Structures are given as C-alpha cells and as structure tokens.
C-alpha cells in the first residue's frame, strides 16, 4: 500500500527514534500518512535536519582529508605532466568524494581511510628494500620507495635489447604523446573516478615499461612499490604505463609492499596497452602493512589477437581495492583474470572488475576466490559486458568464497550485460565454510583438525597460487596458516 507524506524528506534511519509514530490510514485506495500531532511533525523535521547536519559534517571531514593530502605534495610540475596535473585537478574539484551513496563504493567502507592525517615524506632517510621481497626468477627490477626511484635496490643489468624500463622523462620523445594519450582512458584515466584523478593530480613522474615488437622475454620484470614511515602517516601516488609491442611476449609483476609496520596510503594507477598478437602475463601482489591502505586503478587496452593473463593476490592493508578494467578492442583478443583475496581480523578487501567485449570473437575467463575470517569483509563486483556487434563472444565468470568465521562477510556481485546474440556467457557465485565431512575424513586418518583445515584451505586457493615463485608461495602459505 502506498502513502504520501505532507512534506518532502530525505531518506533516514528512524529506528532509534521511538517517540515518533507513523500510522497509515487504510480507508483510502492510495493511502496516506497521518502524523499524530504537531509536536511529532516538528520532531520528524528535526530528525531530518539533524541528518543533513551530520552529512555536512562528514563531508567537511573528507574535505579536510583532501586538504591534508595535497598539503604534502611537491611543488608544481612543469611541461606535459604539469598540464595533465592541472587538468586532473580541475576535474577532481568537480568530482564528489566517494561515499556509500555512490554505486561503485556503496559496499566499501572508507571511514578509516578518511581518518588518515598526512605528513610530508622525509626523503633524506629512506631505507633499502629488504631482500625478502626480491624474487630470484625476476632479475629485472625497478624499485620505488615512498614514490621515489631507488637506484640502489633496482637492477637493469642484461636487459634485452630495446626493452625500456625507466622514467617518462627519458623515454623516446616520438612516443611520449602516445603515453600521455593513454592517461585519459579507462579505470586508470581521467574518466576512472576520484582515486585515479587524485593520482594524476599528484604526478611527479611515470614509470614506463616498453617491450619492442617481436621481443620474447622469459624472465619476469619486477616492479616494487614499497612504503615506509616509522612515525608519520604519508601518501604516495605511483603510476605505471606498460606498452607491449606487436607479437611480443613478456611477464611483469607489480608488487606493493611495506618496509616495517608502516602507516601510509598507496594510491597507484596502471595503464596497459597490448598491441596486435602480443601476450602479457601480469601479476599484481598486495603485501602492505595492516596499518596502511592500498588502492589500485588498472586499465588494459587489448588490440587484435592479443592475450592478457592477469593474476592478483591481495592480503595486505586495513583497506585495499583493485579496480580493473579490460577493453578488448580487436577481433579475437582474449583475457584470463584470476584473483585471490585473503582478509582477516577487520580488514576490508575489495575487487571491482569490468571486462568489455567490444569486437567479435573475443574470449574472457574470470575466477575470483575469497578467503575471509575474523570480522573481515570481502567485496567482489565483476561485470562482463558484451557490446553490440561483438558476436561469437565466449565468457565465463565465477566467484568462490570461504567464510571461516561467523562474523566474516562477503558481498559478491557477478554481473552480465549482454547486448548481442550468438554468445556463450556464464556467471555464478558460491559461499561456504570448510566441509565438516571432509575434516572428519582427515581426522579419521590421524590428521589433526588444525592440519585438516589448513590442507583444505590451501587446496581451495591452490588453483590461483600455483605457478608463483617459491618465495611468494611460502609467504602466502604462512599467512593463511597464521589465522587458521
């Protein structure tokens, strides 16, 4: 039954206001609401005004956070980057700060992030990168600590001919325009929303990795963004651009880590361009401290016949989020997206993805696994789009979650948008605890309950973590074992 209020109100929660009583007259077909007394009407309006005041105060707090953020940034950058910073900041000024009113952020609590009060980074006393983060099978290494390139920890020895890893300032002048043009596109660009705009508004440099046409690089290129802060809370905004030339084959690892128990906000953005028939294995790792937050915006532009193999592992930060967008802009392009989210205690870990089939005969496959315990929250929102004219599309998407405690939470939203016929598309989501029958089976063969839970959990994630370097496999295994 519908009803009409005698005045306009905004939505609010009235559960804590017992003196207010609303009654509905049932003698009308449409129905109407009757306020029992003028005093109750006044009380109702006061509640609405109070809510508006609280909203205003909350917005003020977020604006203070933004002011704190920009107060730590370096002086204005000149040249092309300076122009992009200016444009981005102008757009940012007209972009609302994310809140639970925004569809893409309504499931992701940001209050703890907006409580961070930032200080300037002391660049005179930055440490070296601990050896535990180095990967033996990735000899080519670019290391940034608090957003600053560390020549001491990096290694470009024996880099294959014509492969470029370095600053945009040192890149081929004839190709710089192509790099800058990519900054406007997708999830990591100007249209990507608040956080990529924030990243671009603070640009000091861009790390460029360029793989030449026909190159085959069997060893991984390891990009490490490390954060360090002993006493103060800091922020930095790394940006990476990857160009995979025609028919090239390469492997890249983007690795976010913390040196010690650091307090910081790492707001990164990555843009990938795959030329015709190129292949890229891209691994994203988040191992930041639990006192830090890591948000990554990633956009991939695939050309005809290219293949993008993406793997993500996220188990760091009190708040982490990956926003991944893949545009298949060529006939026969394909991608594989596998991800693992591990969250414990009060961690919040979010994975948003958009895979758009824009041309015919493209294929995509996505598998996301979530391991949530304690009072942690996991979020998975994966959208598969099949655009008009993208016939003979094949796509599958699946989210699987293990909730290992009664207070753990998962929000899983697999979404299909199909605007074309002659396609094969599936999606689904499952949520469960460890199977007690399987645990009993292990125990009946002399294996303890703790060991049985560990083996079943490792079995759950094995599909995602197989193929990782031994050092990473051990850290993932130890991390899982720490909360079982």
Image (spheres, grey):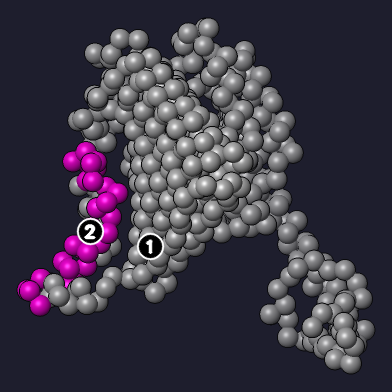
Please indicate, yes or no, whether residue 274 appears anywhere in the rendered image. yes
Which residue is found at the position 87% from the left and 82% from the top? 30
Residue that extends furthest to the front in the rendered view of this protein: 422
Give the main secondary structure of the magenta stretch: helix
Where residue 194 appears, as percent x and y from the top left, is 63, 41
Which residue is found at the position 43% from the left and 43% from the top? 364
Where residue 226 appears, as percent x and y from the top left, is 38, 34
N-term-proximal mark, 2 vs 1: 1
In the displayed structure, 53 sits above or below 366; it is below
Secondary element at image label 2:
helix
Q: Which residues are magenta?
A: 444-473
Please indicate, yes or no, whether residue 143 appears anywhere in the rendered image. no
Residue that extends furthest to the left in the rendered view of this protein: 446
Residue 470: say if magenta.
yes
The circle drawn on residue 135 is none
Residues packed near mark 1 inside 10 Å, few (<14), some (14 to 19) or many (20 plus)? many
In the displayed structure, 110 sits above or below 357; it is below
Instruction: Tell whether label 1 touches label 2 (CB within 8 Å).
Output: no
Q: Is residue 208 left or right of residue 475?
A: right
Where residue 434 appears, as percent x and y from the top left, is 28, 70
Secondary element at image label 1:
strand
The circle drawn on residue 401 is 1
Which residue is found at the position 84% from the left and 80% from the top? 3
Residue 456: say if magenta.
yes
Give the CA separation, mark 2 to mark 1: 13 Å
The residue indicated by pointer 2 is 459
Image quarter where the N terminus lies is bottom right
Q: Is residue 134 left or right of residue 259?
A: left
In the displayed structure, 191 sits above or below 413; it is above
Q: Is residue 309 left or right of residue 76?
A: left
Q: Is residue 272 left or right of residue 29?
A: left
């Amino acid at each position: 039954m519908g009803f009409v209020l005698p005045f306009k109100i905004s939505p609010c929660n009235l559960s804590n206001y017992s003196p207010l009583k609303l009654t509905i007259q049932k003698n009308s077909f449409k129905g109407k609401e009757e306020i029992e007394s003028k005093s109750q009407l006044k009380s109702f309006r006061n509640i609405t005004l109070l809510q508006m005041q609280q909203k205003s105060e909350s917005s003020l707090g977020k604006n203070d956070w933004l002011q704190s953020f920009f107060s730590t940034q370096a002086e204005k950058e000149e040249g092309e980057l300076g122009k992009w910073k200016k444009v981005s900041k102008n757009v940012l000024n007209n972009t609302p700060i994310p809140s639970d009113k925004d569809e893409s952020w309504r499931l992701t609590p940001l209050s703890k992030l907006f409580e961070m009060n930032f200080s300037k980074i002391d660049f005179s006393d930055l440490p070296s990168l601990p050896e535990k983060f180095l990967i033996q099978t990735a000899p080519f290494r670019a290391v940034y600590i608090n957003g600053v390139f560390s020549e001491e920890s990096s290694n470009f020895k024996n880099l294959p001919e014509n492969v470029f890893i370095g600053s945009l300032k040192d890149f081929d002048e004839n190709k710089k325009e192509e790099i800058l043009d990519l900054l406007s596109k997708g999830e990591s660009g100007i249209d990507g929303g608040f956080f990529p705009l924030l990243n671009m508004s603070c640009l000091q440099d861009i790390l460029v990795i360029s793989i030449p046409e026909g190159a085959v690089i069997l060893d991984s290129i390891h990009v490490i963004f490390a954060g360090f802060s002993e006493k103060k809370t800091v922020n930095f905004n790394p940006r990476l651009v990857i160009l995979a030339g025609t028919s090239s084959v390469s492997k890249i690892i983007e690795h976010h880590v913390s040196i010690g128990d650091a307090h910081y906000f790492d707001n990164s953005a990555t843009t990938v361009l795959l030329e015709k028939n190129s292949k890229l294995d891209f691994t994203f790792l988040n191992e930041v401290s639990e006192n830090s937050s890591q948000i990554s915006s990633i956009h991939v532009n695939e050309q005809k016949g290219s293949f993008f193999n993406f793997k993500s592992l996220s188990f760091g930060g009190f708040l982490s989020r990956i926003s991944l967008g893949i545009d298949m802009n060529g006939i026969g392009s394909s991608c594989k997206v596998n991800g693992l989210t591990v969250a414990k205690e009060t961690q919040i870990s979010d994975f948003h993805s958009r895979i758009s089939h824009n041309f015919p005969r493209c294929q995509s496959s996505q598998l996301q696994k979530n391991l949530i315990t304690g009072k942690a929250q996991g979020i998975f929102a994966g959208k598969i789009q099949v655009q008009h004219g993208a016939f003979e599309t094949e796509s599958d998407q699946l989210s699987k979650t293990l909730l290992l405690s009664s207070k753990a939470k998962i929000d899983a939203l697999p979404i299909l948008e199909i605007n074309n016929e002659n396609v094969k598309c599936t999606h689904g989501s499952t949520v469960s605890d460890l199977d007690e029958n399987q645990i009993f089976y292990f125990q009946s063969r002399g294996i303890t309950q703790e060991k049985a839970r560990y083996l079943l959990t490792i079995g759950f994630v094995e599909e995602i973590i197989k193929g990782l370097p031994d050092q990473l496999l051990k850290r993932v295994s130890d991390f899982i074992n720490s909360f079982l």
